[in-house]
Image (cartoon, rainbow, N blue to C red):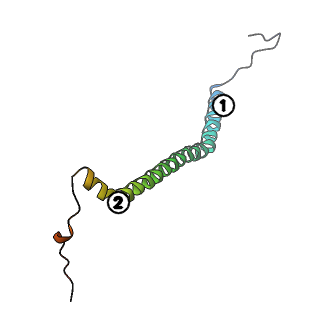
Amino acid sequence: MFTFGREKARVGAKTVALYAISVALCLLATLIYIYPSIQATNLMYEYSGKLKTLSELNELNKKIKLEISSLASYDLIEKRAVEKLGFIFPATNQVVIIAKK
């Protein structure tokens, strides 16, 4: 290269190996330092997704409970029995009341 009158420095194999090992150790230390924060970030994203899923399931649960309560209401059952199944109310002489002694 351009030495501008200087002599080239002779670098031995040991020096190159020492620099390579130093760089590798620095990279390893950096990865060891950064890895937990990456894991924490991934866990936070996963946690956020689980919270969203929980919220959606709670909302679905509320809707299902509301539907169950509306389907179990006696007025709705009576209305469907009369309209869809053709049921009619019995005449007073058709009703027998059994009293408990």
Query: Which image quadrant is residue 98 in?
Result: bottom left
Q: Quadrant of the C terminus?
A: bottom left
Please tell me how crowded label 1 is: few (under 14), some (14-19), or many (20+) other residues with Cα within 10 Å.
few
For residue 19, the mark is 1
Query: Which image quadrant is residue 37 in?
Result: top right
Local SS, label 1: helix
Q: How far apart in space, not on screen, are marks 1 and 2 (Cα)?
A: 85 Å
Residue in the picture at 47% in, 51% down: 59
Percent x, y for residue 40? 58, 47
Residue in the picture at 30% in, 58% down: 77
Give, as a three-letter code, the residue at label 1. Tyr
Q: Is residue 72 left or right of residue 44?
A: left
Residue in the picture at 20% in, 65% down: 90
Question: Mark 1 or mark 2: which comes first in sequence?
Answer: 1
Q: Is residue 18 left or right of residue 58?
A: right
Give, as a three-letter code, the residue at label 2. Asp
Percent x, y for residue 95? 19, 71
Local SS, label 2: helix
For residue 75, the mark is 2
For residue 53, the mark is none
Q: Nearer the viewer, residue 101 or 17?
A: 101
Percent x, y for residue 26? 65, 37
